[in-house]
Amino acid sequence: MIYAIGDVHGCCKTLKALMQKLPYEPDDLLVFMGDYIDRGPDSRGVLEYLIELLDRHRKLVYLRGNHEQMCLDALKGGQADDMALWVQNGASATLKSYDGHMDAGHVWMLDAMPLWYETEDYFFCHAGVDPRFSLDQQPKEALLWMREPFIESQQNFGKQVVFGHTVLKQVWVTANKIGIDTGCVYGRKLSAIALPDQHVFEEPCCDL
C-alpha cells in the first residue's frame, strides 16, 4: 500500500494526529507531498517529526515543495529578492519556530529532498506537471509551482499524477490526477490517501 500525505505547512499537531489514523505497515510506502514549512506555527516540529519517522519506518519519500525551495533559495542563495519572496510566503512563522535561525541539519534535509517520485502506476510531485512535456522531462518550475494548465488537463500522462500545492475542498480524484492539499493551514483539514484503493483519511486542523 502507498499512503500520500498532503501539505502540512507547520501544522505539527495535526500531522501527528493524522498519522495516528493511517494503518500503515512496515512495508508500506509513505510519500509526503512537500510544503512542510511556512505559515503554520511549528515548522521546526514538523521537520523534527519527519526525522523521527526515519528511525521508525524504512519506506519514506519526502518530496520538496515550493516553500522548501523558497527557503533554500533565500538561505543558500543570499539574494534580497529570494528572501523577500520567502518572507511574503510565510517565512516569519518558520523562523519564529527556530528562534530566528534554522537548524543547519534541517536545511540540508530540505536540500536533499527530491522533486518527484514514481512507481509503476503513479507519479508523485508537489505541484503538478506541464502537459507539454513527458514525465521524465518535466521542468523543475512545473514540479514546484504548476497549477494551470495542469489542473484542467484531461490528458493521459501515462501515470496518475498525485500532487498537493493547489488547495481543494476535498481530495480530488480523476482519471489522470489525484490532488490532496485540503488547506490545513487555512483552518481546514490535512488529508492523506491510500493507493491503490483510494481510501481517504482526514484530520481537522488543530494547530491554529
Image (tube, rainbow, N blue to C red):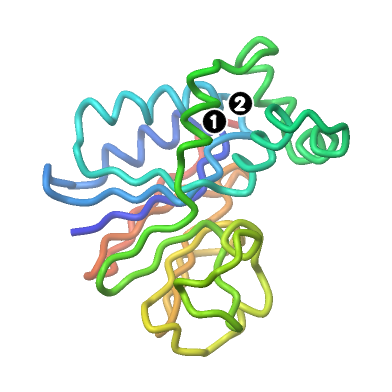
Estimate the x, y position of residue 142 in percent, counting from the top left.
62, 65
Q: CA distance from mark 1 to mark 2?
A: 7 Å
Label 2 neighbourhood size at 10 Å, few (<14), some (14-19), many (20+)? many
Residue 53 vertical placement versus 22 (above, below): above
Q: Is tag 1's residue or tag 2's residue first in the polypeptide sequence?
A: 2
Residue at x 56% of width, y 80% of height: 133
**Toward the viewer: 23 or 37?**
37
Residue 74 x, y percent position in the rendering: 74, 32
* Quadrant position of the N terminus in the picture: bottom left
| Kind of residue at badge 2 | Pro
Q: Secondary structure at mark 1?
A: loop
* Disc 2 secondary structure class: loop
Q: Which residue is mark 1?
A: 207
**One can see residue 39 in this view:** no
Q: Using the rendered view, name the quadrant where residue 40 is placed.
A: top right
Marks 1 and 2 in Cβ contact (< 8 Å): yes
Examine the rendering and report whether any part of residue 187 can be seen. yes
Image quarter where the C terminus lies is top right
Residue 27 in the figure: left or right of residue 207? left
Numbered mark located on residue 110 in the image? none
Task: Tell me the tag on residue 41.
Answer: 2
Residue 26, above or below 45:
below
Residue 146 percent coordinates (x, y): 64, 66
